[in-house]
Amino acid sequence: MSALIPAPLSTVELPPLDTSQPPWPGEFHQVDDHEVHVRVTRGNGPPAVFVHGLGGSATNWTDLAAQLREHVNGYSIDLPGFGRSEPIPGYDFSLPAHARTVIKYLETFGEPVHLFGNSMGGAISLIVAATRPDLVRTLTLVSPAVPDFRPRLDRMSDPRMALAFLPIVGSRVRRELAKLSAHERTRQMLELCFADPSVVPDHRIEESIRENEERARQKWAGHALNRSTFGLMQTWLMPGPKSLWRFLPLVKAPTLVLWGENDRLVSVRKGPRTARLLPRGRLLVLPKTGHVAQMERPATVARAVLGMWEAVDRHTW
């Protein structure tokens, strides 16, 4: 087995990290019959598109988009059923369906983009890059949701989620989970996704609570989360040519794989295999970091991304 080439970190000066930055302003785009909500970070350079994970939204990229704005224009998409993107009737929330939405959005740019994906968004971005290489300039995967079948209940925000899709008891469990308050959902998310929840500023916690309150008022949000979870699990179980693992060797774009050493959702042990299967993949493991490195370590993630872009420009990636 070949040794992995380490991912370099750029030494370029970054803007001061301003964690008081509110979520970037949003706008709606007609994408494949959806009214898709996109938060836009006006900057300099080519487009960068950010795809959030399961249960997340465009706000997950606020700080990283700010760190990179001197190099790209940032576009953080709310997938259908998440954030402020209401899904159209009949949308099935499978990974291929989400990937189709992202592809249709990328087609509007008229040039390849720097594509980013975290968790489920990483799996979606992987499918996009493998099936439409013409749309992707570089790919950055932050703890992508590749198949991981460790039998650990602490990987779930609530252990009852393991029962949510079972027959008979599943509907009752889903009703109980729906009763969780916005504060409880935010607390669970912080403890599950961050290695050290204490690094999250109070105002970011308040933003998350307000976002969860908004989701509670959306008639479609709970269904979208449940169906997307089921769709992700289905993709993990796909055999042979439909397996997510089979998409990695098809990615032509230079790819940076970032993983938190303390990721509880998708084990960092999947990092080396993921990077090795990518023809132009490199891995960077971040210590004392959980599942959302772009939120927990935005400056380091930005330096890693810029390091990739610099290496690509030098033809050394």
Image: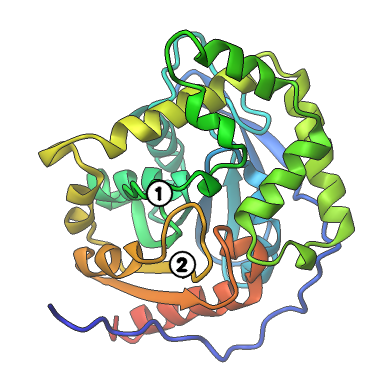
Image disc number at residue 266: none
Q: Quadrant of the N terminus?
A: bottom left
The answer, for residue 95, to whether it is visible in the render is no
Camera-nearest residue between 193 and 104? 193
Q: Position of residue 91 (x, y in %)?
A: 45, 16
Looking at this view, is 147 or 129 the one in front? 147
Is residue 87 depicted above or below 11 in this figure? above
Residue appearing at x 28%, y 68% in the figure? 275
Residue type (three-letter) at the residue carrying disc 1: Ala
CA separation, marks 1 and 2? 11 Å
- Secondary structure category for the residue under label 1: loop
Q: Residue furthest bottom?
A: 11
Frontmost residue, 131 versus 70? 131
Residue to which mark 1 is pinned? 145
Give the image location of residue 39, x and y in percent.
Answer: 67, 44
Q: Which residue is mark 2?
A: 259
- Indicate how the structure is coloured in the image: rainbow
Crowding at mark 2 (Cα within 10 Å: few <14, some 14-19, many 20+): many
Q: Quadrant of residue 12?
A: bottom right
- Residue 302 visible in the snapshot: yes
Instruction: Inspect the image, locate mark 2, and give the three-letter code of the amino acid beneath it.
Output: Trp
Q: Secondary structure at mark 2?
A: strand
The number of callouts visible is 2
* Left or right position of 189 against 8: right
Q: Is residue 192 left or right of residue 97?
A: right
Report the residue at 18% width, 54% height from top.
Answer: 250
Residue at image point 82% right, 54% down: 204
Q: Residue 61's image quarter?
A: bottom right
Q: Is residue 170 above or below residue 50?
A: above
Residue at 20 percent across and 63 percent down: it is: 277
Q: Residue 211, image x and y in percent?
A: 77, 36
